[in-house]
């Protein structure tokens, strides 16, 4: 047996606490990505959910820049509001699954029979924050949209810009763990692909042009910012962590996520397009360099160094196929239908801790279809329907990535009117998304199973006695022993467009 003197010294314990305390001193930088557009579609255009096939405004800059040459010059502003009504219900924890305060004195034998500290350091369950996410989350988000399309060379080269700016919070980013490590922080579950992801700003610029009457191209990029911070920290007294001195050096670098498109028109009334969007993400990386008064550093070092990297708003690479057809080109009664298929490579997903899920996500195929009816008076009525399967496999093991299959419908009305001699196209649109109910029960054996955080063979380091309450599975995983999830997204917006 190892003597109690081999436990970490008080000074070492203070150092560990100090390191943990200063870890949060990063400066979170802004970053632009496109989760809101990928979730809600074109916020100020008709046929929001089939924009890759039926875009008729500046939203084509992001969804399909090959359509830009066929879109009239114009400038538009819009306002869109979405309500997130998301629910996660936690199953009741079984008796005997809590971790007692005995964990502080628990060590485990290694392969040679010598005692070693626990590789994981869970807290007593009674010391955790209340287990969360049992109540409905209702967030209201609003966006300002700005866009324009302008032909530089008629039909041959057009430029477009499209921006989506959250009005309440300029940029929202949240880091969390998707397993038992979240016990040290919120001790709760959250929907993985909503929430803060919908609070990110998007700015995209594109070019499109016709090569022939039946073939056009498009190229665009979404602006991104990656942030790097270096935080020098000085702690005069490791025993008194309320006093420290900190500075921060921050560098913000511009990144670009490209997207490409090709459009074909084999028949006058039939169009098809291919789109490609590269993966996009917002990253914050940094270093904490911590100095202590009267401390022996590693040879060649003058500080204790920590590094960290967070990823937010990861959007995977996607390939889309869009088809549209004009069923009746009578100018007094024009019907247009569209179909969009989009494959997304979610198997490359990086979570907020810049880690790939242990249990790989699935690539998905999203299907959306839409119809548009335009009258002689330039009034348009439109409707879309979309099926968006979740990429997240059943979370019946250690991880807690909460997500659901989604069924969405959108519709709206656009009409033209004159305001003091200025022609204005005004539109209203609504969306309804249903996150279909899903339930999982956690596994305690097999691959990716919930971790037993209080091992059965743990003993008291002082007495060598075993712990009866270590028998069986004890876990602080917030999702154990299971949970159910569902939800709604409700959106509505207005847009005004005028010719340039």
Image (cartoon, rainbow, N blue to C red):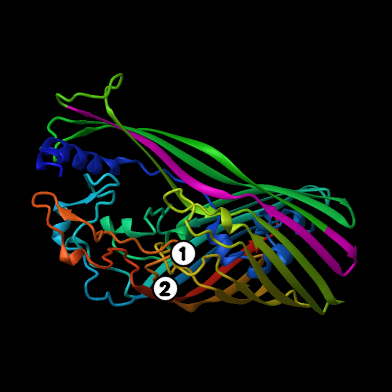
**Is mark 1 in CB contact (under 8 Å) with mark 2?**
yes
Position above or below: 355 against 415? above
Which of 203 and 111 lies nearest the eye of the viewer? 111
Q: Please provide percent x and percent y for residue 215.
A: 86, 55
Is residue 273 shown in magenta? yes
Is residue 102 shown in magenta? no
Answer with the quarter of the image where residue 48 lies.
Answer: bottom right
| Mark carried by residue 86 | 2
Q: Secondary structure at mark 1?
A: loop
For the point 12% across and 32% down, the residue is: 237
Can residue 187 be seen here?
Answer: yes
Q: Earlier in the sequence, mark 1 or mark 2?
A: 2
Q: Secondary structure at mark 2?
A: strand
Answer with the quarter of the image where residue 361 lies.
Answer: bottom right
Q: Please provide percent x and percent y for residue 441.
A: 40, 75
Residue ID for mark 1: 194
Which of 383 and 448 lies nearest the eye of the viewer? 448
In this rendering, position of residue 299 left or right of residue 161:
left
Which of 260 and 482 lies nearest the eye of the viewer? 482
Q: Quadrant of the C terminus?
A: bottom right
Tell me how far mark 1 sits from mark 2, CA to CA: 9 Å
Q: How would you classify the magenta stretch by its main secondary structure?
A: strand
In this rendering, position of residue 274 left or right of residue 12:
right
For the point 40% across and 64% down, the residue is: 449
Position above or below: 371 against 311? below
Q: Please provide percent x and percent y for residue 302.
A: 27, 22
Q: Which residues are magenta?
A: 264-292
For the point 78% across and 67% down, the residue is: 323
Answer with the quarter of the image where residue 484 lies.
Answer: bottom left
For the point 31% across and 66% down, the residue is: 478
């Amino acid at each position: 047996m190892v003597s109690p003197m081999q436990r970490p010294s008080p000074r070492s314990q203070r150092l560990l606490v100090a390191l943990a305390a200063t870890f949060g001193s990063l400066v979170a930088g802004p970053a632009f990505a496109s989760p809101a557009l990928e979730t809600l579609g074109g916020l100020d255009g008709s046929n929001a959910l089939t924009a890759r096939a039926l875009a008729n405004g500046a939203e084509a800059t992001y969804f399909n820049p090959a359509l830009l040459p066929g879109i009239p010059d114009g400038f538009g502003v819009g306002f869109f509001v979405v309500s997130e009504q998301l629910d996660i219900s936690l199953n009741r924890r079984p008796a005997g699954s809590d971790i007692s305060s005995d964990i502080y004195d628990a060590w485990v034998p290694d392969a040679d029979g010598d005692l070693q500290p626990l590789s994981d350091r869970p807290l007593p369950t009674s010391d955790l924050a209340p287990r969360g996410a049992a109540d409905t989350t209702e967030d209201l988000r609003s966006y300002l949209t700005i866009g324009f399309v302008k032909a530089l060379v008629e039909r041959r080269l057009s430029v477009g810009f499209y921006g989506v700016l959250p009005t309440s919070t300029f940029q929202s980013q949240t880091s969390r763990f998707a397993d038992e490590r979240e016990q040290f922080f919120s001790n709760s579950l959250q929907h993985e692909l909503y929430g803060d992801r919908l609070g990110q700003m998007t700015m995209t610029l594109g070019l499109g042009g016709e090569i022939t009457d039946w073939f056009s191209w498009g190229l665009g990029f979404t602006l991104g910012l990656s942030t790097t911070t270096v935080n020098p920290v000085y702690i005069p007294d490791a025993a008194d962590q309320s006093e420290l001195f900190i500075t921060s050096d921050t560098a913000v670098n511009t990144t670009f996520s490209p997207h490409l498109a090709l459009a074909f028109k084999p028949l006058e009334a039939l169009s098809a397009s291919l789109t490609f969007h590269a993966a996009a993400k917002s990253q914050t990386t940094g270093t904490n360099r911590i100095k202590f008064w009267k401390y022996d550093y590693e040879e060649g070092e003058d500080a204790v160094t920590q590094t960290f990297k967070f990823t937010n708003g990861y959007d995977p690479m996607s390939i889309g196929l869009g088809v549209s057809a004009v069923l009746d080109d009578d100018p007094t009664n024009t019907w247009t239908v569209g179909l969009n298929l989009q494959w997304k490579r979610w198997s490359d997903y990086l979570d907020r801790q810049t880690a790939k899920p242990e249990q790989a996500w699935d690539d998905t195929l999203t299907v959306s279809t839409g119809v548009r009816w335009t009258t002689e008076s330039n009034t348009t009525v439109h409707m879309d329907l979309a099926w968006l399967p979740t990429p997240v496999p059943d979370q019946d093991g250690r991880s807690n990535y909460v997500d659901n299959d989604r069924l969405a419908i959108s519709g709206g009305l656009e009409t033209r009117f004159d305001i003091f001699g200025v022609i204005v196209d005004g539109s209203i649109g609504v969306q309804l998304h249903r996150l279909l109910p899903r339930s999982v029960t956690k596994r305690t054996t097999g691959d990716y199973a919930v971790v037993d955080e209080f091992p059965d063979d743990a003993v008291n380091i002082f007495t060598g006695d075993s712990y009866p309450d270590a028998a069986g599975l004890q876990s602080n995983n917030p999702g154990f022993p299971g949970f159910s999830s569902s939800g709604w997204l409700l959106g509505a917006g207005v847009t005004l467009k005028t010719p340039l």
